[in-house]
Image (cartoon, coloured by chain):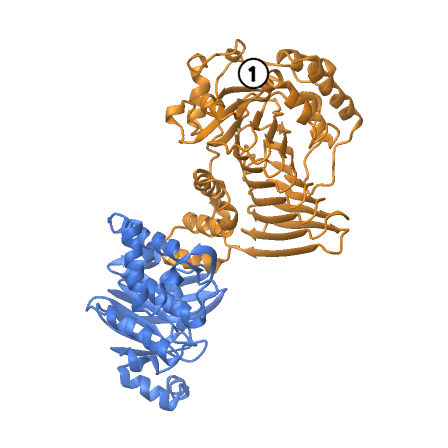
Chain colours: A orange, B blue
């Protein structure tokens, strides 16, 4: 492809600054003592510690998965620090006024004001900085509706019965290597509980920030939607620019009970590494939801960051008539690698799933869609529709598709469509001949390609996602 | 307005234009005719700055500026418009969004404020009517699933919206039925205002029944081998190009 397009994809990573905040950071290394330290730091009850230790012991027996279409040097898990918290958070500030102004400034710089009056109306935010939650906004308003939205470390104390019942119920400790690691050392994350029949009065969102050097972030999110309830949740992520790779291994579990609906949107913009492929976040994430009768879970993700992404937000369609959706835009540039997709496991009758995956590769990056559609014997009348489109920018990148389809029920209807296309010189020329500069042209073409996914995002974030693509692609045309 | 002197150009290492001279004054219509492979389309592409079309010698002055020194989008903003022979599709980008971005880019260049969505919508509706294109096309992806005729009318609509100083129509008549041809011709004629100039590249005399040129140039082997008024087009229709090539040889 033309050099023009090639050089447009080189923009500065805007969230790449480091905040000078004094932190308590555990020295690198992982052993039982570290797990005990994290648990003690959070003043956790015995059962929580036991749960972590069980996960840690399982992890020690497990092997790192190597089947994904990504390549990176072996990770030394002993060289990572498993806990880091701003010092100022040690004595648990009661209100925003007591929070270190530098922390608030960090989020403001990222476009996430934490003062409620300055925020997007109707969006509550939980801000997680390295290993701890800094602040959760609009809590009072949510509590009026009976909604619990708090750091998971707090939920362990506040509603232990819910945490005990559901933690690990969708992603068990031994599910996979990274899930086991997360279960052992997770430090914070968000907890959401929507009571029966309640429609959550505002969008919930968590903003994850890695700041400290050589630390991993291991957050754990648990969302429980009781019968007939509705919730829309969004997460965003950024990290400073560093030459070293940093590890991020999160677990997200969603439980949608009968007739409940959960919409989970992600705008992932971890530091992707520089133009030469140095540095960046290793993003190894396990996300899964379970749908009971008539329930619906919808995953929407816009993945533009990270050096390596390994992530498959999935749905277990357990209840009859339940619905799973997966809408994804994965953009890789320079030397980024992404292996992402979904799993739709159809167990109940008349379960339906939709998968729309858009992969955009630029520079020398590689992007893979990996998806599993499994129809179990009992899933009479199950249906799946999958559409998988890849867009290549330039001629040194790659797009790969690995669809797995397993149907054990003859009444199932499964459709799979896939396309691969390139941003053509002719499209670029048309745009430029009409007065648009190359960057605007590329971003317009790419946004057009992603339209079907962006329309699934909550309004406020669809605009953000479009802008993020622009930033990520800047420099890909020259 | 446009002065082309001794222009040579190559495409993929192949010399296509070999010393071309044309002067276009404000308000004039110049028709470029010639056999296949004579370099007709190359001229429009070189003037509009299509990547891969490289001017190797000669000069092009447009409104007093060295046109060849400008980037593709700068030439467009200065008022050069190319109506494509084969307009490409841009899936998922609505025609409306594309046109608005384009109009805004032109206005910004001219130091004018961008149009509001409402103002633009009104303008776009009126313009689509002028080219007999249903307003529903404004919401569809750029050229996505358009028929050949619809694509060409869409090109003319863009030309009307952008109000360029020099319009280059690259075989816009190819593949058009007589009704669509008239729509295109009416569009061009309605835009004549004594200042705006046109270069109409065509294979056939037919289009020139509707768009009457001031000059007809015959391009062969990368050079203009004959220029004349509209009667030259009729002569070509009757005699073909062979006699001209013989004459030059």
Q: Is residue B121 above or below residue A204?
A: below
Report whether A273 appears left or right of A37: left
Compared to residue A81, the image places residue A348 above or below, namely below
Is A85 in front, or is B105?
A85
Q: How many marks?
A: 1
Mark 1 Cα shell of 10 Å, populated few (<14), some (14-19), many (≥20): many
Residue most extreme to the left = B194
- Residue pictured at 68% horizontal, 25% vertical: A165
In this rendered view, identify the residue nearer to me: B102 or B54: B102
* Residue B135 placement (x, y as % from top left): 36, 63
- The percent position of residue A95, horizontal first and vertical second, equals 45, 14
Q: Is residue B45 visible?
A: yes
Residue at 45 percent across and 78 percent down: it is B36
* Residue ID at (40%, 31%): A120
> Residue placed farthest to the right in the image?
A61
Q: Position of residue A61 (x, y in %)?
A: 80, 26
| Left or right of A33 in this view: B4 | left
Residue at the outermost top position:
A91
The image shows residue A444 at horizontal and vertical percentages of 44, 50
Chain at tag 1: A
Vertical comparison of B225 with A286: above or below:
below
- Looking at the image, which residue is at 70% across and 48% down? A349
Up/down of A288 relative to B76, above or below: above
Q: Is residue A397 visible?
A: no
Residue ID for mark 1:
A85
Residue A56 occupies quadrant: top right
Q: Name the secondary structure under disc 1.
A: strand
């Amino acid at each position: 492809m033309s050099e023009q397009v090639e050089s447009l994809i080189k923009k500065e990573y805007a969230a790449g600054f480091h905040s000078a905040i004094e932190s308590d950071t555990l020295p690198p290394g992982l052993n039982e003592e570290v797990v005990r330290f994290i648990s003690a730091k959070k003043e956790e009850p015995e059962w929580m510690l036991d749960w972590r230790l069980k996960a840690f012991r399982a992890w020690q027996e497990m092997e790192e998965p190597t089947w994904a279409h990504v390549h990176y040097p072996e990770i030394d898990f002993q060289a990572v620090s498993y806990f880091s918290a701003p010092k100022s958070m040690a004595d648990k500030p009661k209100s925003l006024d007591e929070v270190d102004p530098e922390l608030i400034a960090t989020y403001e710089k990222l476009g996430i004001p934490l003062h409620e009056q300055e925020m997007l109306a109707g969006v509550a935010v939980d801000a997680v900085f390295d290993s701890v939650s800094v602040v959760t906004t609009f809590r009072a308003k949510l509590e009026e509706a009976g909604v619990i939205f708090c750091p998971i470390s707090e939920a362990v104390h506040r509603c232990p019965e819910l945490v005990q019942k559901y933690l690990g119920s969708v992603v068990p400790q031994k599910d996979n290597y990274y899930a086991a690691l997360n279960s052992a050392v997770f430090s914070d994350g968000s907890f959401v509980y929507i009571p029966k029949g309640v429609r959550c009065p505002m969008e919930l969102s968590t903003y994850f920030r890695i700041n400290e050097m050589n630390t991993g972030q291991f957050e754990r999110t648990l969302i429980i939607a009781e019968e007939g309830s509705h919730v829309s949740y969004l997460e965003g992520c950024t990290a400073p620019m560093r030459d070293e790779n940093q590890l991020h291994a999160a677990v997200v579990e969603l439980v949608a009970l009968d007739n409940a609906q959960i919409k989970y949107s992600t705008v992932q913009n971890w530091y992707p590494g520089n133009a030469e492929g140095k540095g960046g976040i290793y993003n190894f994430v396990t996300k899964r939801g379970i749908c009971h009768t008539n329930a619906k879970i919808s995953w929407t993700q816009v993945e533009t960051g990270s050096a390596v992404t390994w992530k498959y937000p999935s749905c277990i369609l357990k209840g009859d008539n339940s619905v799973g959706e997966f809408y994804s835009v994965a953009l890789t540039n320079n030397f980024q690698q992404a292996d992402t997709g979904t799993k739709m496991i159809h167990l109940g009758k008349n379960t339906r799933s939709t998968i729309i995956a858009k992969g955009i590769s630029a520079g020398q990056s590689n992007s893979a869609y990996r998806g599993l559609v499994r129809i179990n014997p009992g899933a009479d009348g199950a249906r799946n529709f999958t559409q998988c489109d890849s867009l290549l920018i330039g001629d040194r990148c790659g797009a790969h598709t690995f669809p797995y389809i397993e149907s054990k029920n003859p009444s199932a209807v499964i459709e799979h469509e896939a396309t691969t296309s390139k941003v053509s010189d002719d499209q670029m020329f048309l745009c430029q001949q009409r007065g648009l500069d190359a960057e605007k042209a590329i971003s317009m073409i790419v946004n057009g390609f992603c339209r079907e996914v962006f329309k699934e995002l909550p309004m406020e974030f669809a605009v953000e996602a479009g802008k993020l693509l622009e930033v990520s692609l800047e420099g890909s045309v020259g | 307005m446009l002065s082309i002197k001794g222009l040579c150009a190559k495409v993929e290492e192949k010399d296509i234009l070999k010393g071309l001279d044309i002067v276009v004054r404000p308000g004039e219509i110049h028709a470029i005719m010639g056999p296949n492979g004579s370099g007709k389309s190359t001229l429009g592409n070189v003037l509009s700055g299509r990547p891969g079309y490289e001017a190797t010698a000669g000069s092009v002055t447009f409104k007093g500026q060295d046109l060849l020194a400008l980037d593709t989008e700068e030439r467009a903003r200065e008022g050069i418009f190319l109506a494509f022979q084969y307009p490409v599709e841009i899936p998922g980008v609505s025609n409306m969004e594309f046109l608005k971005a384009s109009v805004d880019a032109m206005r910004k260049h001219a130091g004018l404020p961008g149009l509001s969505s409402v103002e633009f919508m009104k303008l776009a509706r009126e313009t689509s009517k002028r080219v007999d294109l249903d307003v529903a096309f404004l919401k569809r992806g750029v050229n996505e699933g358009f028929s050949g005729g619809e694509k060409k009318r869409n090109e003319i609509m863009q030309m009307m919206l952008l109000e360029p100083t020099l319009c280059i129509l690259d075989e816009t008549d190819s593949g058009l039925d007589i009704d669509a041809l008239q729509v295109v011709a009416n569009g061009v004629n309605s835009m004549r205002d004594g200042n705006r100039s046109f270069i109409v590249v065509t294979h056939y005399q037919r289009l020139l029944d509707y768009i009457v040129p001031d000059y007809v140039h015959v391009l062969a082997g990368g050079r203009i081998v004959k220029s004349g008024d509209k009667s030259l087009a009729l002569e070509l229709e009757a005699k073909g190009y062979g006699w001209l090539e013989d004459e030059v040889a």
